[in-house]
Image (tube, rainbow, N blue to C red):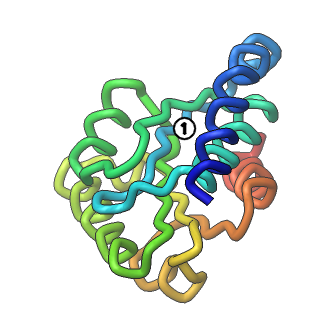
Amino acid sequence: MVVGGEIGEAIASLLEPYFRESADRRERVVLGTIEGDIHSIGKNLVKMVLLSTGFDVVDLGVDVKAEMFVKAAVEHSARVVGVSAFLTTTALNIRKVVDALRAAGIRDRVVLMVGGAAVTEEFARSIGADIYAMSAVEAARKLREVLGS
């Protein structure tokens, strides 16, 4: 599985420049896997689908602390923050992102999208996420609906 993930990441990095060239930039998305979690396959799939459907993606990588999501959202004037969690033990850290967005005074200005194997719709609602997506395609579709684009 690890080798498969590395192969997928290598392929994604080869294709990414083509998606960036063809996409017309509408909204910027800050995307990352939550602190304590080093899984990237799902996040990378979401990134590629978002890029290919016209979003600009700032990929923070894996094991991202809540404060880094906020810093990147402010620095890049992102309208969306997307947080992924594969492990149930790390999914709880997504609450820290919500708290950090509120503390920075930007929670009401960004759309919070969550997903990953450890995240459920019920959990997403309980933390006040705006979007819960089970797949990369669903993430792009729901973002378009919420953003009206």
Q: Is residue 83 above or below residue 55?
A: below
Q: Is residue 121 left or right of residue 83?
A: right
At a point 75% along the width and 49% down the height, the residue shown is 140
Place residue 131 in its image quadrant. Answer: bottom right
Which of these two is toward me, 48 or 103?
48
Spot occupied by residue 23 in the image (x, y as percentages of width and height) = 78, 20
The kind of secondary structure element at disc 1 is: strand
Spot occupied by residue 6 in the image (x, y as percentages of width and height) = 59, 42
Q: Is residue 118 left or right of residue 138?
A: left
Place residue 34 in its image quadrant. Answer: bottom left
Q: In this view, does 53 lie to the left or right of 89?
A: right
Which of these two is toward me, 54 or 8?
8
Name the residue that disc number 1 marks: 29
Spot occupied by residue 16 in the image (x, y as percentages of width and height) = 70, 23
At a point 47% along the width and 39% down the height, the residue shown is 30
At a point 67% along the width and 48% down the height, the residue shown is 46
Furthest-top residue in this view:
21
Furthest-front residue in this view:
3
Which of these two is toward me, 111 or 52?
52
Q: How crowded is mark 1: few (under 14 residues within 10 Å), some or many (20 or more)?
A: many
Spot occupied by residue 68 in the image (x, y as percentages of width and height) = 26, 41
Q: In which quarter of the image is the C terminus?
A: top right
The number of numbered badges drawn on the structure is: 1
